[in-house]
Amino acid sequence: MLVSFFTSALTIAAGIGGGLALLAIMTYLVPIAALIPVHGMVQLGSNIGRATLLRSHIAWPCVLAFLAGGIPGAWFGGLAVGWVDESVMTLTLGLFILGLTWTPLPAMAGISTPGYVLTGAVTSFLTMIFGATGPFNAVVLSKAFASRMRLAATLAAIMSVQHLLKFAAFSLIGFAYGPWLPLIALMIITGLAGTWVGRFALIRTSERSFRFVFSVCLSLLALDLIRRGVAGMPHA
């Protein structure tokens, strides 16, 4: 329960990191077959709480465009569960995030609606396979929004949409959530408490400090993705 509290506080304070950290820790607590669905439900609760606290800063057109792409993405991702090479995808995603985080690019405030639709489709497909695609969404939004509050709020709303789609897709596939509901409920409650605490750190952090911590967290997560991808590849 404490894990959910601290990872939720990390996510709202630094903008990213809690979801992937929670996923890594849950591998020791939850069977692999149930890991992605259960993690998704816990993250759904935490992200809804974060989005609610920051709702006045959400860029809703971006969220709706993401939803439009996320629906087919989650559907096809559900069909692909089990046959996509997770190691290659994990390695590729890690390299992409690391490169985009530190490559000087102009702000993409004018990113088109199709761009958000495409992001929603791709990351919703990927989240069905290895769970945490928050860093991918975060690096795209970090180039689109100059305000840390707008970035954190819109990312929380987008991740809420994505985890809701994941829940629907796994339910259609036939995953039984019932036995896991008590654990999910307790982790959501402690996660909401962490979100409330982390909000104060976000408000008090300067824009420059937030961007630096945000980039460092993204880089650490990207390096871990690269490590996991390489470790999972077959060796001669």
Image (cartoon, rainbow, N blue to C red):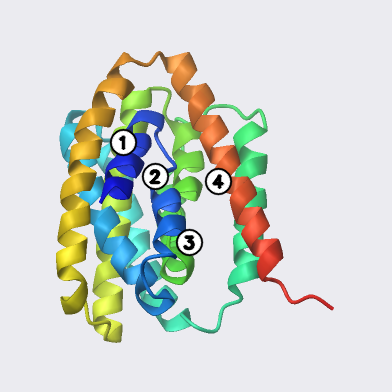
First in sequence, mark 2 or 3: give its number: 2
Q: Are marks 2 and 4 in contact (CB under 8 Å)?
A: no
Say what amino acid the circle numbered 1 marks: Ala
Say what amino acid the circle numbered 2 marks: Gly
Q: Are marks 3 and 4 in contact (CB under 8 Å)?
A: no
Q: Which marked residue is nearer to the observer: mark 3 or mark 4?
A: 4
Above or below, 116 against 152 in this view is below
Q: Residue at x 19, y 52 (%)?
A: 188
First in sequence, mark 3 or 4: give its number: 3
Q: Position of residue 113 (x, y in %)?
A: 39, 46
- Give the distance between the C-alpha atoms of the residues marked 4 and 1, in whole angstroms: 17 Å
- Give the distance between the C-alpha atoms of the residues marked 2 and 4, in whole angstroms: 10 Å
Label 2: element kind: helix
**Residue bearing the label numbered 1:** 9
Above or below, 47 against 52 in this view is below
Give the crowd class for mark 1: few <14, some 14-19, many >=20 residues within 10 Å.
many
The image quadrant where one finds the C terminus is bottom right
Q: Which marked residue is nearer to the observer: mark 3 or mark 1?
A: 1
Label 4: element kind: helix
**Residue bearing the label numbered 4:** 221
- Give the distance between the C-alpha atoms of the residues marked 1 and 2, in whole angstroms: 8 Å
Residue toward you, 51 or 184:
184
Give the crowd class for mark 4: few <14, some 14-19, many >=20 residues within 10 Å.
many
First in sequence, mark 3 or 1: give its number: 1
Q: Residue at x 24, y 72 (%)?
A: 168
First in sequence, mark 4 or 1: give its number: 1
Say what amino acid the circle numbered 3 marks: Val
First in sequence, mark 2 or 4: give its number: 2
Say what amino acid the circle numbered 4 marks: Leu
- Give the distance between the C-alpha atoms of the residues marked 2 and 3, in whole angstroms: 21 Å
**Residue bearing the label numbered 3:** 122
